[in-house]
């Protein structure tokens, strides 16, 4: 498949996500379709579609978007506990067939108001044990007939899916993306994921994690194709380096002014991967060539905790250094989403896909 470069669709009914200034249309089919078609028209392979309780159902949104695009690949975020594995495997196989094999899946294990949709409260070890079973069972249902499975969290008897996902030369089924930095999460990725997603850590941290995951793949007896690696990060790209840093610093200054007006997020420091990002600010505002850590001090979270900042050449060069480490999947974003989908696609993707930077 080569390097796959995706964008991000936030999938929310509330305006203002990460500073986006679009005030109307969130949660509508028109805006979701416009975001996806803009990504398709400006060179992106597809986009991650965000998930969360209290937001539009991600799988429903992805299905509607797939019906209105041609090449766009939806990377659909789903949660064990919200979905039962057999139900999800059937829905995903159906969408994959209807879209001509375009579906990608991001399995998320973090806390997300689980009591509100009836999930049981599990500690971290149980959550990841359940996720491993979910991934294993979904794979089997996609590729085998008459599946009988007995696990701690799931069981099925003599299950056969129809239809099955599209099988291609580079994929036996939709790719299964997964995130998480804790020891439990890494063992799940090494055993059952297709792609491990990292947030915007410095190069040495990503290199260490890739090496560890490759070791773990041997330790856990991985039975699938080698684990692949991806980077999910915010990119602040402007025509010149100076313009990009001015825009980034102005945005962080605004975040600092607003920091005291937002209620604290009790889960902000709970995840190991999130804590790793927040700790980076103690090593300096700028790491490697252009990884900006200051947003994390003022409420930036997840993929918005660190940003790659610079001209198109600066950011392309920084991303290529991750590719040199073995990363083959990129999920980028910036706001306003609609404008940046087009602008960053036009400015950056040609440089990333060229044989060498010029």
Image (tube, helix red, strand yellow):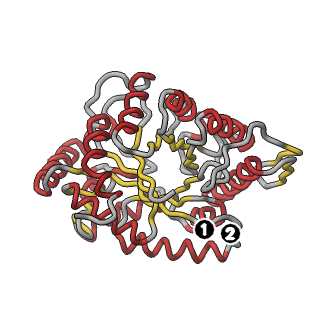
- Work out whether 64 lies above or below 83: above
Percent position (x, y) of residue 349? 32, 51
Q: Residue at x 38, y 52 (%)?
A: 303
**Classed neighbour count for the residue bearing mark 1: other residues with Cα under 10 Å, few (<14), some (14–19), many (≥20):** some
- Which of the two residues, 324 or 200, is positioned nearer the viewer here? 324
Percent position (x, y) of residue 255? 22, 45
Q: Which mark is residue 344?
A: none
**Classed neighbour count for the residue bearing mark 2: other residues with Cα under 10 Å, few (<14), some (14–19), many (≥20):** some
Q: Label 1's element?
A: loop
- Work out whether 337 lies above or below 125: above
The answer to whether residue 19 of the structure is visible from this angle is no
- Which of the two residues, 146 or 288, is positioned nearer the viewer here? 146
Q: Do the residues labelled 1 and 2 touch (CB within 8 Å)?
A: yes
Q: Label 2's element?
A: loop
Q: Residue at x 49, y 71 (%)?
A: 210
Q: Quadrant of residue 18?
A: top left
**Relative side of 342 to 63, left or right:** left
Q: Quadrant of residue 315?
A: bottom left
Query: Which image quarter is the C terminus in?
Result: bottom left
Question: Distance from label 1 to label 2 (Cα)?
Answer: 8 Å
Q: Count numbered badges in the picture.
A: 2
**Relative side of 306 to 171, left or right:** left
Q: Which residue is drawn at 68% across and 40% down?
A: 93
Q: Mark 2 points at which residue?
A: 222
Percent position (x, y) of residue 239? 15, 50
- Which of the two residues, 103 or 301, is positioned nearer the viewer here? 103
**Relative side of 172 to 346, left or right:** right
**Relative side of 155 to 99, left or right:** right
Percent position (x, y) of residue 63? 56, 31
Q: Name the residue under label 1.
A: 226
Q: Which residue is drawn at 74% across and 37% down?
A: 163
The answer to whether residue 36 of the structure is visible from this angle is yes
């Amino acid at each position: 498949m080569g390097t796959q470069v995706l964008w991000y669709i936030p999938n929310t009914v509330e305006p203002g996500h990460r500073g986006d200034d679009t005030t109307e249309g969130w949660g509508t089919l028109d805006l979701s379709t416009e975001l996806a078609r803009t990504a398709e028209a400006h060179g992106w392979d597809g986009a991650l579609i965000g998930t969360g309780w209290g937001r539009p159902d991600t799988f429903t949104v992805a299905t509607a978007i797939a019906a209105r695009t041609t090449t766009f690949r939806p990377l659909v975020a789903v949660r064990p506990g919200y979905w039962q594995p057999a139900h999800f495997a059937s829905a995903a196989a159906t969408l994959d067939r209807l879209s001509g094999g375009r579906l990608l899946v991001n399995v998320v294990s973090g806390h997300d108001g689980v009591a509100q949709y009836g999930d049981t409260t599990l500690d971290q070890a149980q959550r990841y044990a359940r996720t491993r079973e979910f991934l294993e069972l979904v794979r089997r249902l996609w590729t085998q007939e008459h599946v009988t499975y007995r696990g701690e969290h799931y069981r099925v008897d003599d299950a056969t899916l129809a239809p099955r996902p599209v099988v291609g030369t580079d994929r036996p089924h939709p790719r299964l993306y997964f995130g998480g930095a804790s020891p439990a999460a890494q063992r799940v990725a090494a055993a059952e994921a297709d792609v491990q997603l990292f947030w915007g850590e410095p190069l040495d941290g990503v290199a260490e994690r890739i090496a560890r995951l490759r070791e773990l793949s041997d330790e856990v007896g991985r039975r699938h194709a080698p684990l692949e690696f991806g980077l999910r990060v915010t990119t602040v790209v402007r025509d010149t380096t100076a313009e990009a840093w001015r825009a980034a610093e102005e945005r962080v200054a605004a975040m600092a002014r607003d920091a005291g007006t937002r209620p604290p997020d009790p889960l902000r420091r709970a995840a190991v991967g999130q804590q790793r990002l927040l700790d980076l600010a103690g090593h300096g505002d700028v790491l490697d060539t252009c990884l900006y850590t200051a947003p994390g001090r003022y409420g930036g979270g997840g993929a918005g905790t660190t940003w790659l900042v610079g001209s198109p050449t600066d950011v392309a060069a920084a991303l290529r250094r991750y590719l040199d480490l073995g990363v083959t999947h990129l999920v980028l974003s910036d706001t306003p989403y609609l404008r940046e989908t087009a602008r960053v696609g036009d400015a950056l993707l040609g440089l990333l896909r060229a044989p060498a930077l010029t």
